[in-house]
Image (spheres, rainbow, N blue to C red):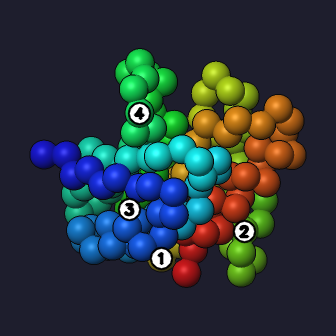
Amino acid sequence: MTLSILIAYNPINLVRSLSLDFEYPTRIPAKFPDSSKRLRLDVVKNTSRNYVVLIKQDSPCSVPNCIVGKLVGKRGILRREGQAITLRNGRTALYQDCNSSCLSSITWGENGTNYQILYAIDEDNYSDRLKQLKKMANSSLN
């Protein structure tokens, strides 16, 4: 079964309530790039060891183009690669850049769980993509 929650233009309250459905802490962002898009979060996997949440546009679109991102949490090993960056409170993470044809990602670990935010950032240059994804990741941290 897939749990789906619609996020309108200010996702903070609905997104935070989503974390109640998981067996361990989630890292669900409170800020998303381009807040003019209506988004939907679909929980496609939720077990005691990991979760996967798809971030989709809530508008007519062709199937691969509807998915704009993913949120992943996994106890144990999660593939971690990329450039080292620092998130809020000095937390070290890895940033993997990608242009508009794929998803950029930030991955970090805390308390035995690895977290990853992947998102298609609509920015032309590296520093703007990093800045947007970093805001998203920082908004998911306590």
- Residue at the disc numbered 3: 75
Which circle's residue, 2 or 3, is located before the other in the chain? 3
Q: CA distance from mark 1 to mark 4?
A: 37 Å
User: What residue do we see at 77% from left, 49% from top?
Assistant: 130
| Residue type beneath disc 1 | Asn
- Residue at the disc numbered 1: 111
User: What residue do we see at 22% from left, 52% from top?
Assistant: 3
Q: CA distance from mark 1 to mark 3?
A: 9 Å
Q: Mark 1 and 2 residues: CB-CB less than 8 Å, in contact? A: no
Q: CA distance from mark 1 to mark 2?
A: 16 Å
Residue 30 shows in this picture: yes
Q: CA distance from mark 2 to mark 3?
A: 20 Å
* Res 62 → quadrant: top left
| Residue type beneath disc 3 | Arg
Dot 4 alpha-carbon crowd within 10 angstroms: few under 14, some 14 to 19, many 20 or more? few
| Residue type beneath disc 4 | Ser
Residue 121, x across and y down, in percent: 67, 39
- Residue at the disc numbered 4: 59
User: Is 80 left, or right, of 2 in this rendering?
Assistant: right
Which circle's residue, 1 or 2, is located before the other in the chain? 2
Dot 1 alpha-carbon crowd within 10 angstroms: few under 14, some 14 to 19, many 20 or more? few
